[in-house]
Amino acid sequence: MVLPTLPDVDRIKQRIQAPDYRDWRKKVEDVYGCLHPVRLSGSWQITDKTTGHVLTRPDGRPAETSGHILSPCGNRRESVCPACSDRYAADAFQLMRAGLSGGSKGVPVTVSDKPRLFVTLTAPSFGPVHNRRTKNGKVLPCRCGRYHHEHDPLIGQPIDPDGYDYTGHVLWQAHSGKLWNRFTQKLRRHLARAAGLTVRDFTDHARLSYAKVAEFQRRGIIHFHAVIRLDGPDGAIDATPAWGTVDLLSDAVRAAHADTAVTSPKFNGQALTFAWGEQVDIRPIRPAEARRFEDEHGTISDDRISSYVAKYATKGTGKSEAADRPIRSRTVIELLRTTEHHKQIMRTAWDLGAPIVCPDCHPHGEHQAGGCPCNTIGHCGTCDNGGWIPGPLDELNLRRWTHMLAFRGHFLSKSRAYSTTFKQLREDRQIWRFEQNLAELGVEADTVAVVNHWDMTSVGHRTDEERELAAAIAERTRQARKHRYATERKD
């Protein structure tokens, strides 16, 4: 039997030549090339409040839209959607820069004169791992005796996997968010003590503002990069008290770093205590007029530190050597394309988060076939005849966060008074687009009514060709933004 020869069709060219291509491309460009857009069906109108009639554009077209539109998926992971991840990075940069340099987003330029630090807090060691150390530009041998190249997959892997403390690794990671919160509390206490104030009176004289990002190291554990700023009691708009200096803030950070510890819930009859690693990097941030990222004294400038921190805000979301979505069973872990070390971290998190057998139904442990006491119980009030109860570490939700290697926090978080918010940035874009429409119509906002009605119909592009074209649009949009930013920069 001879199979028919299929015609050699360029499907991408065929899609570009389709009659609806221009309209489709415009919709994709409006969502920056999102790879998993939400398709909505409905209508949008701008009507006159008095008459209720749809307004007319200068070219005679009515100010309305109906049919299908696309909405971005909003996923922050670069491995899932590069377009939305890039948009998140751009917003993170604006958020960080506003709190560093001021002059935008409601933050005054005077913040650049306040005491500010760039602090890196690390995790402790849970066992030696392969690394690539350098000294004076020269690569040093690893503990294993070998010299690793920069992209060696062994870097970050335990030298002795059997002796590595995976339980401590997972539980420290699960408590890292709480550890940061405790650190900020200790930092306020040390600042108050240095200023001769009580902790209660500290808020009447000063405010601690910060923004931090979490970055996954290659060994599968996070560390935090944070911008810490000392404000007056009303935040960014208020002058820092005279006693607030960079040196005082630096000393308080060191003291809080050494003084911070959290305790895990009891399991196997014990509770573990967790603290930061010994390495802590504290660098002062210079005013916005600085022209270099770092000078010989280790100080850093606003504009470049914003880019640096914004990079880490999405670096963690882009790749963590784990999974993009929650793990539903232990079997899924074995199917992931990652290292054995990262799989073992996830296995440990999954096992530590497991429920335990009900002690009333099974007083001797596991279910005993044929002669188990659970057969004689009509109804168990402890487990409602389910046979299982939450384990001692249930409050950590380890199974829910197994795909994040047990990290339960946000990749980027900030204090209330540091700067603007992601929500406000999104609302600002919406207002800007709305004002563009009003300017085109020549009307004021208080004279019109906007009618929106949309229903979700599907998610994602319809074909592989559309997805590939959307990826090209996303890359072009990203390069255009980077070029525009590089052109606008002054340093």
Image: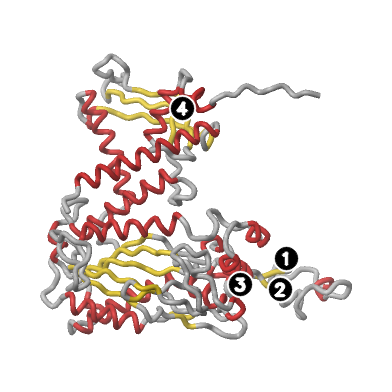
- Judging by the rendered image, the residue that carries numbered circle 1 is 386
Q: Secondary structure at mark 2?
A: loop
Task: Give, as a three-letter code, the residue at label 1.
Answer: Gly
As measured in the structure, the alpha-carbon distance from the residue carrying label 2 to the one carrying label 3 is: 17 Å
Q: Are marks 4 and 3 in contact (CB under 8 Å)?
A: no
Q: Quadrant of the N terminus?
A: top right
Give the side of residue 288 with respect to residue 95, left or right.
Answer: left
Task: Give, as a three-letter code, the residue at label 2.
Answer: Cys
Give the side of residue 360 with respect to residue 54, left or right.
Answer: right
- Judging by the rendered image, the residue that carries numbered circle 2 is 358
Task: Give, as a three-letter code, the residue at label 3.
Answer: Leu
- Judge by depth and name the residue closer to the eye, 2 or 210: 2
Mark toward the start of the polypeptide (2 vs 3)? 3
Mark toward the start of the polypeptide (2 vs 1)? 2
As measured in the structure, the alpha-carbon distance from the residue carrying label 4 to the one carrying label 3 is: 46 Å
As measured in the structure, the alpha-carbon distance from the residue carrying label 4 to the one carrying label 2 is: 53 Å
Q: Are marks 2 and 3 in contact (CB under 8 Å)?
A: no
Task: Give, as a three-letter code, the residue at label 4.
Answer: His
Mark 4 packing: few (<14 Cα in 10 Å), some, or many (20+)? some
Q: Position of residue 67 (x, y in %)?
A: 45, 24
Q: Secondary structure at mark 4?
A: strand
- Judging by the rendered image, the residue that carries numbered circle 3 is 352
Which of the 4 quarters of the picture holds residue 370? Answer: bottom right
- Judging by the rendered image, the residue that carries numbered circle 4 is 68
